[in-house]
Amino acid sequence: MNNKLDFGSLCVQEWKDLRTTPPHQLPIYATSSFVLDDLEHGIDIFAGKAQGHTYSRYGNPTIDAVAAKIAALETHGLDKTASALLTSSGMSAIATLAMALLRPGDKLLTQGNLYGGTTELFSQIMAPLGIESIFIDLGNLEKVEAVMASNPAIRMVYMETPANPTMACVDIAALAALAKQHGAFSAIDNTFCTPYLQQPFRFGVDFVVHSTTKFLNGHGNSIAGIVIGLDQELMATRVAKTLKLTGATCNAWDAWLINNGLKTLELRMIRHSPNAMEIARFLAQHSRVGRVNYNGLPSHPDHELAKRQMRDFGGMLSFEVKGGLEAAIGFIKKLQFCTMAPTLGDVDTLVLHPASMSHVNIPSEVRQQYGITDGLVRVSVGIENAADIIADLEQALA
């Protein structure tokens, strides 16, 4: 047939896939749509009677493979099976989950020391949709119990542990149990830990979200997120439909980059954690540092809780520079080896000033209440030689 086509038609025609053996690496399916076997096949897929790829907003082999891999990591060693959906960012993962499960009149119970963007999402985007968020100290289980008992409209308990950027932890098992007791979903942001350090499904949580941009990828070259759930039906219906119709799906290229990063996840976390411990100990004894927030230090108020929930203490920490705002900014300006960047989880060490960056739109009194002061500096400790990181911090503090 090809010999009978016009030259221009032959240029346009898709050539036959000449693959004879499976590829060693996951291919990037850079296609917006897929060719259907026949009309009946297409009808059955769209009617939900058959499985198949039709349009990459609905599903794509590259994206689906990476989502399934992360779901397997979150349930590794557990007698549980989860399904997962990759999204366009960590924030879209949180938004997709909330919009899928909550309706106008429902309430969401969460903590006051969330990542600033999540707080803004709940208070500025979800609230006008009729979904009220109640911000309390989730570490106070008696208060959580009382609030849930007096608010039957609470349909989700959303937690972030360790919290960004104070590293405060909450009791995952206790909160998941309280949510179940009161007929609510439980969800957790596991970005800081990754499933290598912490598996929330082990403690009874219903849903896990990640910004895969961070440690799961590890190389700062893609933006994506993921929703992982144990309830297969909810994931396949309400969550999947919300994702499709809002168009917040991931793309094959970013999924492929995540997949590359996942291959070294364990190796990287094994390096991030001891590096962060060494740096936390250095900062804790420095005369210009007021306090250090790192769960690996026995001085951290949530040290014992973190030990119960986490395999190790991870690569994230924050510390207070004595002298407040000016001192913190002066310190960051003097850094030469570490990089100032509004992200975390990369292989190199990244520094951020929460009060003027990640939490700039959170009212000052709210920030201060939860320990996010003007002098606080967040550090995402990389996998470089710890001595080089410490040398840079030391000269910048001098």
Image: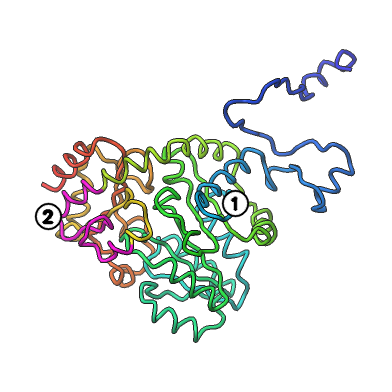
Disc 1 residue type (three-letter): Ala
Q: Alpha-carbon neighbours of circle 2 within 10 Å: few (<14), some, or many (≥20)?
A: some
Q: Earlier along the polypeptide chain: callout 2 or callout 1?
A: 1
Nearest to the observer: residue 170 or residue 43: 170
Nearest to the observer: residue 220 or residue 328: 220
Q: Which mark is residue 348?
A: none
What is the span of residues highlighted in magenta in the rendered image? Answer: 277-305
- Quarter-wise, where is residue 307 in the image? bottom left
Q: Secondary structure at mark 1?
A: strand
Separation of marks 2 and 1 at Cα, in angstroms = 45 Å
**303 part of magenta stretch:** yes
Q: What residue does disc 1 label? A: 84
Depicted 245 relative to depicted 258: above or below: below
What's the residue at 57%, 42% (across, down)?
66
Q: Position of residue 229 (x, y in %)?
A: 58, 58
What's the residue at 35%, 61% (across, down)?
308
**Count of residue discs:** 2
Q: What residue does disc 2 label? A: 288
Q: Alpha-carbon neighbours of circle 1 within 10 Å: few (<14), some, or many (≥20)?
A: many
Q: Secondary structure at mark 2?
A: loop
Nearest to the observer: residue 46 or residue 274: 274
- Side of 124 where 363 appears, left or right: left
Disc 2 residue type (three-letter): Arg
